[in-house]
Image (spheres, helix red, strand yellow):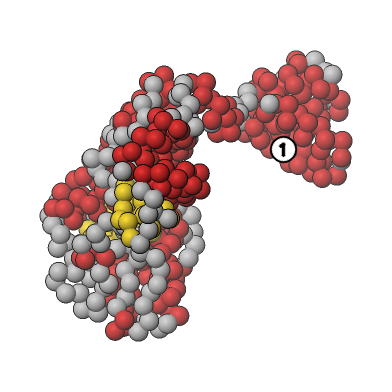
Amino acid sequence: QWTRVCDRLRKEIGDKAFKTWFGEVELGELKAGKLRLYAPTRFVRDWVSRHYGDRVLAYWQAVSPEVSNVEVNLVPPPAPRRPNEIIAMPPVPAPQSSYQQPMPRLGPSIGRGVDEAFQGPEARYTFANFVVGKPNEFAYAAARNIAEQDRPLPERNPLYIFGGVGLGKTHLMHAIWHAIRERDPKTRVLYLTAESFVNRFIQALRTKNTGQFKELFRNVDVLMVDDVQFICGKEASQEEFFFTFNSLVEQNKQIVLSSEKPPSELQDIEERMRSRLGSGLVADIHSSTYELRLSILQTKAESARVPVPHAVLEFLAHKISTNIRELEGALNRVVAHGQLIGREITVEMAQDVLHDLLRQADRKVTVDEIQQRVAAHYNIKLAEMSSPRRARSVARPRQVAMYLAKQLTTLSLPQIGKRFGNRDHTTVMHAVRKIEELKISDLSIAEDVELLKRQLQG
Ligand code: ADP
Ligand code: MG
């Protein structure tokens, strides 16, 4: 009967929509006139019941009149994880409690439990799913090496991975977690963000449970702390972290850290901490290249349910150069549009779907444009932008242009100075300050600046 209902649905709503919405819907049980269907996701569940609920019921009743109600449920969750991955941390770790989770919950026997939500390591963040290219090959090799060592080598402890936002640091850390646990499920690996380290520490102080806090961190085989830059400027946490760190290193336990900055650029951090952080293997992830972005997109597109033309992948890799997370997001959006609305995936379609993202990416204003616009606006010659004349009538527009160059381009002050008749960077700095002041005190300047900005950004 289900097949007959499906056939009719398919005819009615078309092959594409049918596949999208009913492709993975499963038939459940019929009980007392109530029929259950199972949808793979919340989204599909809501959509199907909202838009097709009545129709499904009507078709069912046409073939079996005893059905009085159709209910769409979420598929029951898969079998629970193996207990050793999510169990609470007992006061004295039993030998099989080799898991660690980002936010270990403390057993009820130790007073109040910690009720932060459990977030296990992300299953898809594995080495196998990590696309390697020039910008990340070193960090990848270092991470693999750490995951494969039985005992940490002192010269590679800690492993400190740094790089910009969205370039794969967390992915690599989770991959280490998976690999270690796969090799030896008994290893106690604790992964957490520096933020959660700080929160836990504060909570321990508040509940006077620091003994237990120390015990937790000092009894692991591998400690991984993500985004350690978060600990900067937080003195007490930093100190606690320093002790934890030393105690683990002394016991020859591996430490893995990630950060957005190299140790040398961390601010508000004690010198002894800084030198500790950089004392092992420091591996950086460089910003991505076109080739790496394209190969990441190819990999991800292969697992998408609709084919994405190569030209579209090239287009995305070309246009979205900020970070991998955004790149993934863009691909997902294009794929979702293709799937849900049934639109054919083309470069034009991608352009359309991503216009907000692309506007940002395209907003690269050049100094030449700025100078031309500003000169035209104030009705002066373009040459005055680099001339030595100091008359107010040309000096002020020049300052506005310098200000805009600082605001709208990524050039440094000396670079900007060069483009304005080889002026010194202090001149540019002075111009920027002056215009900032005037924007507050002089309405017409404020308006000029806003107008020019808008014109330039298109
Ligand atoms: P970070 O922690 O450096 O901010 P993440 O590790 O969270 O970045 O990465 C952001 C997203 O990009 C994740 O979904 C991750 O899987 C993906 N990603 C980053 N680098 C790669 C890569 N080399 N191969 C595959 N996916 C990647
Ligand atoms: Mg991260």
Q: Quadrant of residue 339?
A: top left
**Label 1 packing within 10 angstroms: few (<14), some (14-19), many (20+):** many
Q: Nearer the viewer, residue 11 or 21?
A: 11
What percent of the width, then of the height, locates residue 439? 80, 41
Location of residue 128 with respect to 218 vertically, above or below: above
What percent of the width, then of the height, locates residue 344? 46, 23
- The answer to whether residue 152 of the structure is visible from this angle is no
Q: Nearer the viewer, residue 435 or 195?
A: 195
Q: Would you name the residue on which mark 1 appears?
A: 432
Q: Nearer the viewer, residue 274 or 215?
A: 215
Q: Secondary structure at mark 1?
A: helix
Given the image, on which type of amino acid does mark 1 rest? Answer: Val
What percent of the width, then of the height, locates residue 87? 25, 69
What residue is drawn where x is 27% and y is 75%?
A: 215
Location of residue 228 with respect to 455 vertically, above or below: below
Q: What is the count of numbered marks?
A: 1
Q: Is residue 146 left or right of residue 366?
A: left
Q: Quadrant of residue 187?
A: bottom left
What residue is drawn where x is 51% and y is 24%?
A: 349
Location of residue 74 with respect to 55 vertically, above or below: below
Q: Is residue 68 left or right of residue 351?
A: left
Q: Quadrant of the N terminus?
A: top left
Q: Nearer the viewer, residue 177 or 445?
A: 177
What residue is drawn where x is 50% and y is 44%?
A: 51
Q: Is residue 294 left or right of residue 150?
A: right
What residue is drawn where x is 24% and y is 77%?
A: 90
- The answer to whether residue 145 of the structure is visible from this angle is yes
